[in-house]
Amino acid sequence: MKKSGVFSAILIVVALIASFIIYKFVFGAAVNFKDANIANAPVNLLGAAYKGGFILIFLMTVSIMVITYSIERALSLAKAKGKGAIEVFLKKIQLSLKDGNIDESIELCNKQRGSIANIIKQGLERYQVLTADKDMNSEEKLEEIKNAIEEAMGLELPLLNQNLSALATLASISVLIGLMGTVVGMIRSFQALATAGTPNAAELSAGISEALFNTAFGLFGAIVGTIFYNFFLTKVGSITYMIDEATYNILSIIAMKTK
C-alpha cells in the first residue's frame, strides 16, 4: 500500500507539471494567436484551448492520471493472469495432483506465475509439508491447507483492486472540475453582456470558449475513467471467480488424497 501511495503522489506532481507545460507552451504558443500575440484572438483550437483558462491545467492533470492508472491496471491484471492460458494451467494442475505429483504441480505454478498460480502454490507447498506429518488427521491437514490458501488470497486480491477506487474518484472529480470551469466561463460571458453599451464580443466569445473547453475536458476525463473503471472491475470479478473455482477444485482433490 505504501508503494501505491508513493506512486500516486509522484503521478500527481508529474501530471501537474506536464499539464502546465502543455498549457503554457503548447496551447499558449504565439503561433496559435493572431499576429503572434496571445492577447489577440486564437487562430486554431490550441489557442482557443489556452483561452479556456487555467482550470484546464487541472483537468489535463486528471486526464493524464486517468490514462496512467488505466495503463497500470491493464498491465497489472495481465500479469495477474500469468504467462499461459489459465484454463490449460488449471487442467494440468488437477491432472498432476490426481497422479500425486506435488512437485510437478508446484513447478507448474512457478512457470505460470500470476495471482492464481501464487495462491495455488501456497496451498500446495503447505500440503507438501503436511504429507509428512503423521500427528495430524486428514481434516486438520485440510483445514491447514485452507488457511494457507486464504492467507495467499488475502495478499493477492487487494493487488487486483489496487487503484480502481482512484480511477472511479478521478472520473467523478473530472466532471466537477469541468463544471466549475464551465460556471467560471459563463460568469465571464455574462459580465461581457452586462457592460454598458455594446457588449464586448471578444470577452463574450472568450467566456463561452472557456465554458465549452472546460466542459469538454471534464467530460473526457469522466468518460475515459468510467469506461476503464467498469472494464477493470469486470476483469477483476472474472479473475476472482476463477480463483474461487480453482481453489475449490484443488481442495476437493486434496481432500480425496488425504483420506
Image: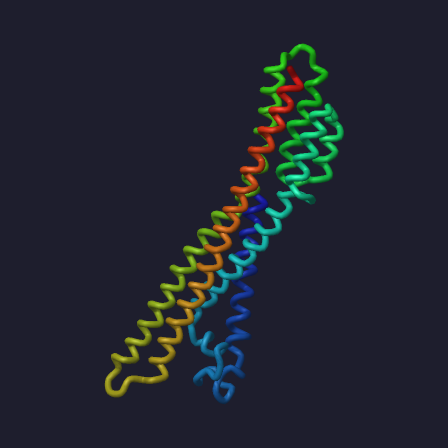
In the image, residue 219 above or below residue 141: below
Residue at the location (32% across, 76% down)?
189
Residue 2 pos. (x, y %): 57, 43
Q: Residue drawn 44% across and 69% down?
A: 54
Q: Is residue 206 left or right of residue 250?
A: left
What is the x, y in percent for residue 161?
Answer: 53, 43
Give how far across and how far down residue 148 sits, in percent: 61, 26
- x and y, in percent, of residue 216 in the image: 43, 68
Indicate the quadrant containing the N terminus: top left, top right, bottom left or bottom right.
top right
Question: Considering only vertical position in the picture, is 167 above or below 158?
Answer: below
Identify the residue shown where x is 35% and y is 72%. 185
Relative to 236, residue 125 above or below: above
Indicate how the structure is coloured in the image.
rainbow
Q: Which is nearer the eye, 185 or 145?
A: 145
Q: Is residue 106 left or right of residue 33?
A: right
Point out the image quarter for the C terminus. Answer: top right
**From this viewpoint, is residue 154 visible?**
no
In the image: residue 222, left or right of residue 183: right
